[in-house]
Image (cartoon, coloured by chain):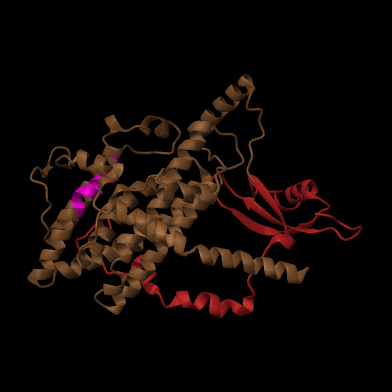
Chain colours: A brown, B red
């Protein structure tokens, strides 16, 4: 459907197209599916958007774990709505990635075969109901921090999908904080589960912003191409700065001995996440990697009959209409 | 799209108003083929600079819901007010949520 009307073998043409592309991006013009773009830009976006889509889909699992055990019907209806949103976000993003010329089938294959990555955060278990609160508050909070600038990214379909997603994420973060407020004002045992969940999700949430800028593989080019607007470290700092006062409001202790407010800069100084753990989770050695992948593969296989039935039904209707 | 004399196919026209925005439906027109549909769309719908990009889609390719199904399709969403962030009360003194 989308094509690039350019002779890819003519170096002169390619160079001219490339400098035109760089000018357009620098001028904050949006790049649309039919526009010429360098192969590396296309590949970078396919990688980033599909990883993002896969994260939404895998992200349904840790939350889905508590659907049948939510503490009230109200909480259950809300969590169900949230998990439905994650599926919706995955679909918006797959569709955006497909405008770059990759098929849905290839994208799904990449996830199921393990060649594509998804966010490391979803490889941690949700052990108590408080984890659902911590995920909404911290993980969705970190996601919003990352995603709001993506609403201005240079690739039109991705930017537009992100605007829609960010609007919906705001509900996710608030429902999480709402759970934390209830627990923090509850019995000593409820307070203890809130603190325990906070302790376990704090560091993985900081890791969501990715490695330090100095170790970040794709950062520089993505900044130039206006895919990325702020560096990993800038966004991580911003997250810490807004989240620590919220933790204080909840009466929770940030699990970081080095954390302190630095008056002159107006920022919090904080300790170093365990990057070995981050690398290990990315390599597939997190607490739930195997479980998440096995579940997704099983769900995909279990859904095969639905896809087959839909096609058979369409074929039957077509033949009776003819 | 094939056309018979005097019976030109109908096209739906979508405009992108500004760089980066969605295309939005603005109306329809008749044209013998895709090229003429774009030309006519330009003349009919963008005389005052309304757009930076045009999509013309054969009207027969549009699948539309029946307005009579409005209730069964859309009312189930209306009582799920908890899907909106404003449903949640944020205590005084909490910022950036």
Q: Is residue A196 magenta?
A: no
Residue sticking out furthest to the right: B5
- Taking the spot 40% from the left edge, 48% from the top edge, the residue there is A52
Quadrant hosting residue B24: bottom right
| A189 to the left or right of A287 | left
| A36 to the left or right of B62 | left
Residue A225 visible in image: yes
Whether A196 is drawn above or below A217: the answer is: below
For the C terminus of chain A, the image quarter is bottom right
- Taking the spot 39% from the left edge, 46% from the top edge, the residue there is A114
Residue A141 visible in image: no
Q: Position of residue B85 (x, y in %)?
A: 35, 65
Q: Nearer the viewer, residue A195 or A170?
A: A195
Whether A12 is drawn above or below A165: the answer is: above
| A194 to the left or right of A295 | left
Q: Position of residue A99 (x, y in %)?
A: 56, 46
Q: Nearer the viewer, residue A248 or A9?
A: A9
Q: Position of residue A152 (x, y in %)?
A: 44, 44
Residue bounds of the magenta highlight:
A201-210
Q: Position of residue A291 (x, y in %)?
A: 31, 56
């Amino acid at each position: 459907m989308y094509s690039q009307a350019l002779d890819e073998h003519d170096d002169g043409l390619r160079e001219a197209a490339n400098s035109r592309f760089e000018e357009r991006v620098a001028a904050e013009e949006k790049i649309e599916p039919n526009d010429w773009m360098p192969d590396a830009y296309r590949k970078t976006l396919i990688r980033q958007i599909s990883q993002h889509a896969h994260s939404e889909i895998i992200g349904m699992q840790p939350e889905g774990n508590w659907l049948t055990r939510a503490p009230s019907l109200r909480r259950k209806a809300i969590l169900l709505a949230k998990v439905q949103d994650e599926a919706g976000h995955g679909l918006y993003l797959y569709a955006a990635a497909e405008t770059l010329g990759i098929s849905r089938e290839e994208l799904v294959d990449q996830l199921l075969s393990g060649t594509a990555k998804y966010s490391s955060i979803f490889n941690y278990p949700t052990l108590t109901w408080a984890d659902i609160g911590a995920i909404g508050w911290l993980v969705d909070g970190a996601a919003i921090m990352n995603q709001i600038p993506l609403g201005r990214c240079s690739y039109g379909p991705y930017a537009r999908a992100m605007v829609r997603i960010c609007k919906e994420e705001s509900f996710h973060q608030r429902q999480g904080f709402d759970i934390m407020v209830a627990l923090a004002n509850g019995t000593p045992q409820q307070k203890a589960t809130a603190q325990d969940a906070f302790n376990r999700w704090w560091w993985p949430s900081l890791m969501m912003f990715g490695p330090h800028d100095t170790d970040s593989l794709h950062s520089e080019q993505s900044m130039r191409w206006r895919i990325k607007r702020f560096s990993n470290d800038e966004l991580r700092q911003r997250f810490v700065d807004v989240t620590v006062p919220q933790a204080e409001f909840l009466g929770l202790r940030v699990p970081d001995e080095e954390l302190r407010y630095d008056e002159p800069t107006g920022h919090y100084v904080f300790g170093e996440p365990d990057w070995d753990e981050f690398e290990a989770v990315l390599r597939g050695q997190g607490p739930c990697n195997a479980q998440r992948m096995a579940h997704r593969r099983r769900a995909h296989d279990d859904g095969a009959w639905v896809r087959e039935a839909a096609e058979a039904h369409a074929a039957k209707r077509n033949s009776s209409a003819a | 799209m094939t056309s018979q004399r005097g019976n030109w196919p109908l096209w739906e026209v979508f405009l992108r108003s500004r760089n980066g925005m969605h295309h939005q439906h603005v109306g329809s027109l008749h044209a013998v083929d895709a090229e003429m549909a774009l030309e006519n769309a330009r003349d009919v719908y963008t005389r005052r600079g309304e757009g930076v990009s045009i999509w013309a889609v054969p009207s027969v390719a549009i699948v539309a819901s029946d307005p009579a199904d409005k209730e069964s399709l859309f009312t189930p969403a209306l009582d799920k007010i908890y899907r909106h962030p404003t449903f949640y009360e944020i205590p005084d003194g909490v910022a950036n949520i």
